[in-house]
Image: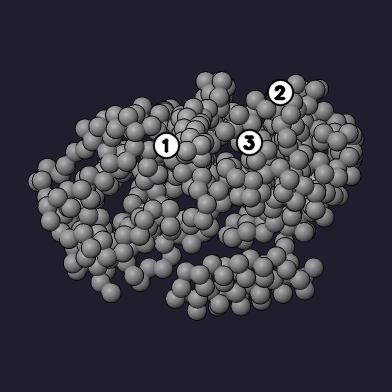
Amino acid sequence: MKLKFALLAALTAAIAGQALAEAPGGKYAGEADRMFRASFKAENPKYWMTRLEQDETMKTCGEFRDNPPRKIGEKLEKLNKATIRYPVDGKLIGDWKEGEKLAAVGTGGHIGFIQPDPPGRVRGGNCYACHELAKKEIAYGTIGPSLREFGKIRGQDEDTIKYVYDKIYNSNAFTACTIMPRFGLHSWLTPEQITHIVAFLVDPESPVNKD
Amino acid sequence: MIQRFVRTLAAAAVATACLGQAAAQDAKVADELAKYREALADGNPADLLEVKGEALWAEKRGPKNASLEQCDLGQGPGKLDGAYAALPKYFKDTNKVMDVESRLVHCMVTLQGFTQAEVTKQWYSTPGKDSDIEALVTFIGAKSNGKPINVPASHPAEAKMAKMGEYIFYRRSGPQDFSCAICHGQDGKRIRLQELGNLTTREGAGVAMKTWPSYRVSQGAVWTMQRRLIDCMRQARWPEPEYLADAIIALETYLQKTATGTVMETPGIKR
């Protein structure tokens, strides 16, 4: 009995400890934010500097070290779900061959004066940075789960297709503060490009679903 | 030196060939990458820069025709042993927490009489244009080789700077929702084939911090920690920070504090 109490007490303390963990920066968080923003070159054009702005999701995720309490997480998920937009023709599955190209492209969007991307450089999903996809590509990262044979395992029904589209468009609609970028929300990818990546994942003909 | 360089090239070629064959398995790939790094370390081009830095340190230069030999990097004027490993640090004379680069620039301005703009104009090298700062920092860094990183951040100003660095580490923004933590907050992950250190642990931060400054094979140049972190922000798709900005020094303080106790192996050599 005593042991049970001790365990319970330890567990409670551990949970409370986690919940009460200080936000990064502690009492200096506000000052640190101003210092961070003031640390960028004056020559940066204003529209570059907007990239330092934080929406509620970013701000909250930082505060909780990307691990918000469930109640707050749910609120953020709802908020993000509401941002999802669909292609005009309503078709959520595109061309897997286009998706395959986008999955491999890691360039685009780099700014600054030292090594910016040339203007008009294609932006991709850079899926392989974090996920295993087609079998033949061995240079894949492991930050995200393996998506190898995704369509084979999950199928191609309407719900799955919509889920994949929504997840790529705004990953935080499902898991608040996930590492995965919100590709649609930030217009990093167009809705049409997202449908191509959806096809790359679920189409039975895609190399993701071939041996 | 040339012989060593040829040997490096040959070793790199062999290692690259090994890499091609290793395509079959993850573990094998990681293994070969480790061997590749080992082969590269056999003749580090940063050694040349270290020699150049040593000469620059002792040379009388600038309007005041003075050397840097009286520069105080935190251990007293001219004391270089272990100085790099103990930075960033609070300096009473400037009332600021300074890293090796901001302190070095401070010395070049106060002792040699250069202007800050002159000194920092070529803070990193470009093809055909060497950087004195890179050479000097490589030399200063090497004087901490074998010494444990020692940034306990016990001075209130240092403790504050480390906390501010922690804040920046977790701060998410930009068109990819990035923060430092999303790639460097977990153990055992990879981006493409590149292993990622968990910089929130002593081990991870130690591995990351002990080898700087480092020769970057892919860049053909030695990178300082300022250069490294400013490029991290480029990768995050953020605008460009100012060289020697407080945000960079804060991150360095946070990382060096976390890495404290790890023995320095510098100059390093990396992909």
The residue identified by callout 2 is B156
Q: Chain of mark 3?
A: B
| Dot 3 and dot 2 within a common chain | yes
Q: Amino acid at mark 2?
A: Pro
- Whole-percent x, y for residue B247 in the image: 59, 31
Badge 1 density bin: few <14, some 14–19, many ≥20, Cα 10 Å: some
Q: Amino acid at mark 3?
A: Tyr
Residue farthest toward the left in the current orientation of the protein: A89
Give B269 or B117, whichever is nearer the viewer.
B269
Give A151 or B174, whichever is nearer the viewer.
A151
Instruction: Tell me which residue sits at (17%, 48%) in the image.
Output: A162
Q: Circle 2 sits in a helix, a strand or a loop, which is it?
A: helix
Q: Using the numbered discs, state the Cα–Cα distance from disc 3 to disc 1 in whole angstroms.
A: 21 Å
Give B153 or B21, whichever is nearer the viewer.
B153
Instruction: Tell me which residue sits at (23%, 36%) in the image.
Output: A81
Q: Which mark is residue A157?
A: none
Q: Chain of mark 1?
A: A
Q: Circle 3 sits in a helix, a strand or a loop, which is it?
A: helix
In the image: residue B257, left or right of residue A102: right
Badge 3 density bin: few <14, some 14–19, many ≥20, Cα 10 Å: many
Q: Is residue B52 above or below residue B25?
A: above
The residue identified by callout 1 is A67
| Dot 1 and dot 2 within a common chain | no
Asked where in the image residue B123 lies, by quadrant, the reply is: top right
Q: Are marks 3 and 1 in contact (CB under 8 Å)?
A: no
State whether residue A30 appears in this view. Answer: yes
In the image: residue B49, left or right of residue A182: right
Instruction: Tell me which residue sits at (24%, 67%) in the image.
Output: A209
- Whole-percent x, y for residue A168 in the image: 27, 47
Asked where in the image residue B229 lies, by quadrant, the reply is: top right
Which mark is in front, 1 or 2?
A: 1
